[in-house]
Amino acid sequence: MRKFILFALIAIVCQQSAMAWGKLGHEVVINVAEHHLTDRAKANIAKYMPYALKKDAVWMDVHRKDPEIAYTSSWHVYNVDANHEYDPNPRLKKGDVLLAIRTADYNLRHYENLNDSTVVMNLRMILHFVGDMHCPTHSYFPGPRCFWPCTLNGKPQKSFHSVYDKMPNFLYKKVASEDVAKQIDNLKKGQIKKIQRGTLLDWVKDIADHNAVIYEWNPFNTKELNPDTVEFSRDLVNTQMRNAGYRLARLLNEYFDK
């Protein structure tokens, strides 16, 4: 227990960098989750975050290079194998998004034993990393990495990875996160519960099964991306943001609805 709590205690002290889903996407995930929080969970969370949760949507990205939490820099991504199962590959020897979520999960299940600032830090982690876990280019498949420079519709992009970091903004220009969340949060209770079921490793497999399609549209090292990449990605991105919101809601309710 001490080992896991230590991660959070070190990270209490709070450089903008690449953000999975960008600010919009992370806010959408949180907005979807909020639709499915119980009143008790909302009230208990508000004791620690008496403000809109989306305010901290990209806190972990903005502060990831701060000396106090620089060790979390690799925690935003994870590896899967050829079968789309979780792969604790040593190329992420400093940890990955599963370590991040497991750390926050352990601490928040015991949040009443923690001081307020530690609870806030772990909430920031779970709010952000569940979203990161679902981002298409944050599933590292075997083979080349997803950081090659490319062009989309004649416009140079920093990397293929960055294209999906910005994809919610490509799809929803000048649309508020609350409006996107209302649009994509369209499943019935039984369907939502099915998505929420399972373990973290079950979620990884489901996420990777969906995310693999982006390399069918644009194989590794494609310099000029398919001009229809954004539209091809619409259903995938909507599904992953929505599912991330549902799964985040399940976790938050488990922690705080008591």
Image: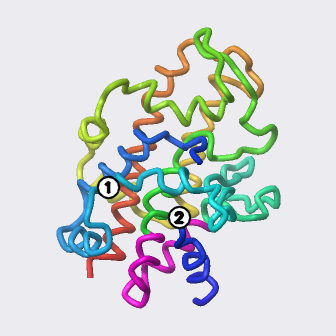
Res 213 → quadrant: top right
Quarter of the picture holding the N terminus: bottom right
Horizontal placement of 86 versus 221: left or right?
left
225, above or below 182, in the image: above
| Residue 14 disc label | 2
Q: CA distance from mark 2 to mark 1?
A: 25 Å
Horizontal placement of 132 versus 254: left or right?
right
Secondary structure mostly taken by the magenta-highlighted segment of the chain = helix
Colour theme: rainbow
Q: Of tags 2 and 1, which is closer to the observer?
A: 2
Reply yes or no: does residue 114 show up in magenta. yes
Q: Position of residue 245 (x, y in %)?
A: 37, 52
On the question of residue 206 being in view, the answer is: no
Q: Position of residue 77 (x, y in %)?
A: 64, 52
| Residue 33 disc label | 1
164, above or below 246, in the image: above
User: Is label 1 in a helix, a strand or a loop?
Assistant: helix
| Residue occupying image coordinates x 56% and y 74% | 103
Res 141 → quadrant: top right
Horizontal placement of 218 versus 180: left or right?
right
252, above or below 28, in the image: below
Quarter of the picture holding the C terminus: bottom left
Of all residues, the one furthest to the left in this rendering is 39
The magenta span reads 99-122
- Residue type, label 2: Cys
